[in-house]
Amino acid sequence: MSDTGKRKLLLLAAAIVLGGAALLNAYDVRPTDAAGGGDRPRSEPSAAKPEAEAQAEAPLEPALPDVRNESLLFRSNGYTMPESEPQKPVPAAPLRPNYEKIGENGSMALYLNRQTFAIQLQDSASGYVWSSEPSESDLQAEQLNEDWKNAMQSPFLLDYYTGDGQRASSNYKSLQGKAAAVTSIDNGVEIAFELPAIEMSLNIRVALEEDGVVFKLLNDSLVEKGPDKLASVQLYPFLGAVRGASVPGYMLLPDGSGALIRFTSSHTSFDEPYTGQIYYNDLGIGGFEGAMNKVGVPVFGIVHGVKQNALLGIVEDGKMNAEIVAYPSGVNTSFYWISPRFIIRSGYYQPTSKAMGGINMYTKTKTEGDKQVRYRLLSGEQSDYVGMARSYRSYMKERGMLPAPRASKPDSKGIPLRIDMLGAEMTSGLLKRGVVKMTSFSEAQSILQDLQQSGISNIRAGLQGWGKGGESGSHPAAPKFEPALGGSKGLRSLAAYAKQQDIELYLNTDYSYMQDKSPRVEPRTDSVRMITNRLLEFDAFSRYNRERFGDLKSYLIRPEKALSLAKEDFQAFREAGIQNVAINGTGFLLYSDFNKKQAIRRSEAAELYGKLGDEAAGQSIGLSWLEPNDYMWKHAAAYFNMPLSSSQFVYSTDTVPFLPMALHGSLDYFADHGNNNPDPELDLLRMIEYGAYPSFLVTKEPTRKLLNTPSNDLYTTEYSDWAPQIKKQYAKANEALKQVMDAEMTDREVIEEGIVKVSYGNGVAIWINYTSRDYASGAVSVPARDMAVTGGGQG
């Protein structure tokens, strides 16, 4: 099974079925790609590939632009709409009666209503006021039912499990809650809430800090005296809520590269809100059932007037067990609102028979630690998704969450090219399985030499299927190298060449995925156990391949075992001359392990993966990660498969490069393999706009040789077909991005539909023209479906 196919399956199996377009190209369906199309539908592989079909292995030709539909395309939620000019100033609402000041610093002041415990946050410079509950006029105009009105006037919402196991939703006011005590703390208060109706009590701290306001639920304060048990909590969820289009602006979702939901009064009704669990759903509890959106960063935001007022929300304590929930207008009410929902307990299905009969249950133990969300106050020019990305970047730098800055500036080698090469793959046979060679180690060297001769000198070369048995032959792969590729001697020779030529050579591996026939692991001791006490088993092959390979059972590896395997591998890799490793699922899959001897929580699993990163650093191994969550960034030499699109949910209005803007200049990131892009020309422009470096997956042999292997989902990989396209795309990307390799993105402006300007801290600006017509403004001229660079000594 190819690395690409395995990654797709893991994501699909992990039930991230509503994630970004880059994550859903595994089987039969995929959202429309943000740059103008999706992958071709998956189809049953044919028994043979006639010569007439050889063209299918060649790089895809650019789609011809349809001028008639261009305007619709650029107005779709796969792109970013231009901001309306001029935008009227959002008036500052006055502070409401019965609020007293409880905190103040040089830039803002915090107020509390001691009857309702609502809060208001005032920007000292502009006077703008953020409120945790809608105004009375908005509530009256909305004509809410009693439950929703109570919810919007409560300091928190909660879900709980009743004594008979049913899940119920309520809020502080509906439960006739009261405050047993209000204690002053530095720049805020701690409130001891009691909920007699369900015999619970909990303490919440509200405090002003230098950059904004912080809400914290104290875990030790939670007391449950009766049969009801707390399931989840949302703290001040209506902070910044907007009714319809009463205030111009939008909500920022951490979906893919980033997505916006603009405030409008013209929309359809929606059945449910956006919900994305931070770091995905916990497979140790829910297994592979259900759906969960891809959220790799614990951030969200809300804007009241673009370039006027904004809040950036960052989930801190408790983020390993939290969701981002966003309600667009039209879901239950006309209000737009967004907040984190902290998970205290989770529901699950407990089978009680082999026929899968069972009962619904919930976890008895609370999730660990306090729950905290920070709202950073932004104003003026910083009050948009660009300012939020810059604020998040600053936040990460302050807390040491990013890699250390490079010791020296990039040289004249140009941008890096990621070129992955598939070595060998397992194939089916009449009596036993064999191995099909796709790229030997000596052939890999020839590919690298050809790229160098074309002028590409900054190469990051990856080997997939390097282990004995090929890509799908054994997981986790042992550091024993496939004889058909040249064995240990061949790999050492390739590694020596790469070192001599200053090429970063890395091996692709994974410490989350295992097969039962691997000699390195034993499922009963090394596999994750779910809360149901069952092994976390899944099908690692597509339905087309289960007949051939379905006897290979697949599991997820315990985090502790993952660390010990990595330690063994890093030493063996160094002895073979390998100093770099690319890790696939381990950077984004985060799950609990309910092994009775030693259970591991998600937060503990993240710490173990951090130790894996420390171990690599201690052995001078550079790590690249596939779509890593933010807690792994400081351990990363590179970020592979940066999302360049959002999921394009029906209620989202724009796709934006929030994540790339937060990381550019701090961490090198690469696009997904470009082999299957439906419109290479347009996708290359998106890659350049988002500051991502090019990537390709190639083989020496024709792709059709993979027909009877688990990697038969790869369509076109033969290097001789792809070499001209790789060199052409690299040259174009290098022309623009070589000038901003270590520069931070400072601004992004959509000039008009399909025309984008991205500005960098070193004075360089990259202009992108997605349209089929030339663009000119003053001294700037950008040809149709092309780009231009200005500043930094350019035109």
Image (cartoon, rainbow, N blue to C red):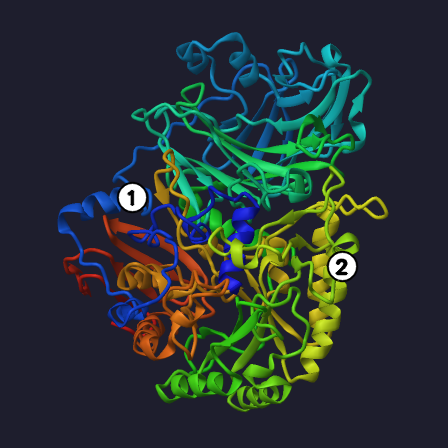
Residue in the image at 28% along x and 55% along y: 756
State the residue position of label 1: 81
Residue in the image at 72% along x and 10% along y: 197
Q: Earlier in the sequence, mark 2 or mark 1?
A: 1
- What percent of the width, then of the height, locates residue 411? 46, 82
Q: Is residue 81 above or below residue 52?
A: above
State the residue position of label 2: 522
Q: Nearer the viewer, residue 661 or 256?
A: 256
Image quarter hosting the C terminus: bottom left
Q: Secondary structure beneath disc 1?
A: loop
The amino acid sitting under disc 1 is Met
The amino acid sitting under disc 2 is Glu
- What percent of the width, then of the height, locates residue 544? 46, 54
Q: Nearer the viewer, residue 366 or 126?
A: 366
- What percent of the width, then of the height, locates residue 377? 52, 39
Q: Is residue 507 visible?
A: yes
